[in-house]
Image (cartoon, grey):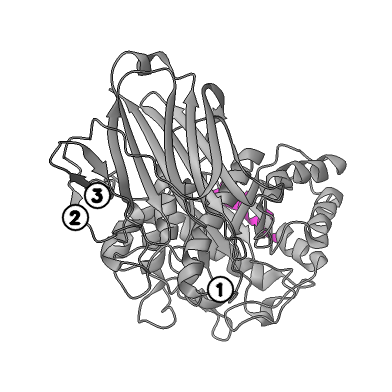
């Protein structure tokens, strides 16, 4: 079944035609309950009246300067679990985002009972009467490739000096799920083994880097064996160590031990970690891949090893910001900004966290308890999904060296240009901006016919369930045409932690 049915078909535009025939675009933040024109209505032939208010900001795009293919963060997603099975309506909403790689949770201590020495790969999941296949089948339906985090065995089997029983349990599970789900491609061994806090009831205890590497050797030997035994069309890959943060001694010691490993069949298909420490300094995320490459080179390891951020965000654990309602928008703006810097730094995969969080809903794409309804974070991902395939040069500001302020990710392909602008203020900034957008050096097709300009907005009162549950979907706030030109300008307002997508299409 195709996943390409875009949910924003039918998105609404608020407009009022006065008796003179001039179409005036109304901004939903001024009147979010105003009637909106259907998407099928013809666009206005008059650009919107320039807004007023806000500090000056600029976004300048050089449409003719390509920077390479966009590795879109929207392609990579996480679902918590394995008890977090989505309702049919919620699953439909996630399918509209078209995940490519989807990370999920596989629990050896749940599918294997060490007391009875028995397996149940479709074990009952906690708190809801579901079984594991319902969760894993959903991962498979929603993605092209499954990224499986295999957690630790039962604590009684976690004996590095005698790993045989846990090894057998891990291999049996990886084999079974690979045979059931041929799209299973990635194995990440354990989750945040370097944790420095008291584990919650659903978390496993921390382990030393030395012990982790013993288990990692077990993991890569299993992957090697299964790739040989099964000869799958999609071979398994394995990596780690899924450290809870980037610049940690654990991550470096893991690489030291991999370098010292004399096993000729050793493999590190990717280096993975999480990042929750960039809330007030998102710009530093841009250099993480370069630093990881330096670590690899210093150890005579392959600097081209892919670097994956398998979770990221600004609200780790049960952390909060200001109010729950404000945090929902802050989460979206932070993920947009971190994504901007990870794209600029060339990180190979950054995985959004998360569809539906079990305890801290401020980091969920979906609204808890309201089937099919979405948070601003979902709408941010929906805007990312509208970005084009090639990055083009853009400069934006004011933007502090730490990444607070206005950033812009600009893209193009043969169908048009899409520019995502974000005003990230974290929780302590208050700046609002009046953004002057200029797109120069438009390709020749923009100089031969008309141009359709559309703008989408996510802010405190637009595309925001906390403000208006009836209009929580991504709202298109402007839609108009202009004559052929080689340079385009537009002006719009960006409130605190607001995001706006401008899509330009020649026709």
The spot of residue 251 in percent (x, y) is 77, 57
Q: Mark 3 against mark 1, which lies toward the viewer? A: 3
Instruction: Looking at the picture, tell me which residue is in the foreground, 183 or 305.
Output: 305
Circle 3 packing at 10 Å, graded few (<14), some (14-19), many (20+), is: many
Q: Name the residue under label 2.
A: 35
Tell me the magenta residue range: 218-229
**Circle 1 crowding by C-alpha within 10 Å: few under 14, some 14–19, many from 20:** few
Residue 14, which numbered label? 3
Mark 3 or mark 2: name the one nearer the start of the chain.
Answer: 3
Q: Which comes sooner in the sequence, label 1 or label 2?
A: 2
Location of mark 1 (residue): 322
Residue ID at (64%, 66%): 191
Other residues around mark 2 within 10 Å, as few (<14) / some (14–19) / many (≥20): some
**Under tag 1, what secondary structure?**
loop
Residue 486 visible at all:
yes
Q: Which of 357 and 14 is in front in this view?
A: 14
* Residue 193 percent across, percent down from the top left: 71, 68
Q: Quadrant of the C terminus?
A: top left
Please identify the quarter of the rendering in which residue 426 is found.
bottom right
């Amino acid at each position: 079944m195709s996943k390409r049915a875009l949910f924003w078909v039918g998105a609404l535009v608020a407009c009022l035609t006065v008796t003179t025939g001039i179409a005036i675009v109304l901004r939903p933040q001024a009147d979010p309950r105003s009637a909106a024109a259907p998407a099928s209505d013809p666009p206005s032939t008059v650009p919107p009246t320039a807004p007023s208010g806000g500090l000056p900001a600029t976004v300048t795009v050089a449409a003719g300067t390509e920077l390479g293919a966009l590795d879109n963060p929207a392609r990579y997603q996480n679902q918590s679990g394995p008890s977090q099975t989505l309702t049919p309506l919620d699953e439909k909403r996630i399918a509209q985002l078209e995940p490519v790689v989807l990370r999920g949770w596989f629990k050896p201590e749940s599918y294997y009972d060490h007391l009875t020495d028995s397996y149940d790969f479709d074990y009952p999941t906690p708190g809801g009467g579901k079984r594991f296949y319902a969760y894993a089948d959903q991962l498979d339906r929603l993605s092209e490739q499954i990224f499986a985090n295999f957690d630790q065995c039962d604590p009684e089997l976690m004996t590095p000096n005698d790993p045989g029983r846990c090894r057998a349990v891990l291999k049996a599970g990886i084999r079974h799920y690979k045979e059931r789900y041929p799209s299973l491609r990635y194995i990440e061994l354990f989750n945040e083994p370097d944790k420095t806090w008291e584990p919650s009831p659903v978390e496993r205890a921390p382990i030393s880097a030395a012990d982790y590497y013993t288990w990692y050797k077990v993991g890569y030997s299993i992957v090697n064996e299964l790739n040989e035994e099964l000869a799958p069309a999609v071979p398994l890959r394995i990596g780690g160590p899924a450290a809870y943060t980037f610049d940690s001694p654990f991550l470096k010691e893991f690489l030291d031990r991999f370098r010292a490993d004399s096993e000729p069949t050793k493999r590190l298909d990717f280096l993975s970690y999480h990042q929750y420490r960039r809330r007030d300094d998102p710009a530093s995320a841009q250099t993480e891949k370069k630093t990881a490459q330096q670590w690899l080179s210093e150890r005579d390891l392959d600097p081209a090893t892919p670097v994956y951020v398998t979770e990221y965000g600004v609200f780790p654990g049960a952390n909060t910001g200001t109010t729950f309602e404000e945090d929902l928008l802050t989460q979206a703006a932070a993920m947009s900004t971190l994504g901007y810097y990870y794209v600029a730094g060339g990180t190979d995969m950054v995985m959004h966290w998360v569809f539906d969080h079990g305890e801290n809903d401020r980091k969920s794409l979906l609204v808890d308890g309201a089937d099919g309804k979405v948070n601003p974070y979902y709408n941010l991902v929906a805007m990312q999904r509208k970005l084009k395939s090639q990055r083009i040069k853009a400069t934006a500001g004011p933007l502090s060296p730490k990444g607070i302020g206005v950033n812009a990710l600009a893209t193009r392909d043969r169908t048009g240009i899409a520019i995502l602008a974000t005003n990230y203020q974290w929780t302590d900034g208050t700046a609002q901006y009046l953004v002057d957008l200029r797109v120069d050096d438009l390709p020749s097709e923009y100089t031969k016919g008309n141009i359709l300009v559309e703008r989408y907005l996510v802010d405190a009162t637009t595309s925001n369930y906390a403000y208006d549950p009836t209009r929580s979907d991504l709202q298109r706030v402007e839609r108009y045409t202009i004559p052929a030109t080689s340079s385009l300008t537009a002006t719009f307002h960006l409130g605190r932690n607001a995001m706006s997508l401008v899509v330009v299409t020649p026709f």
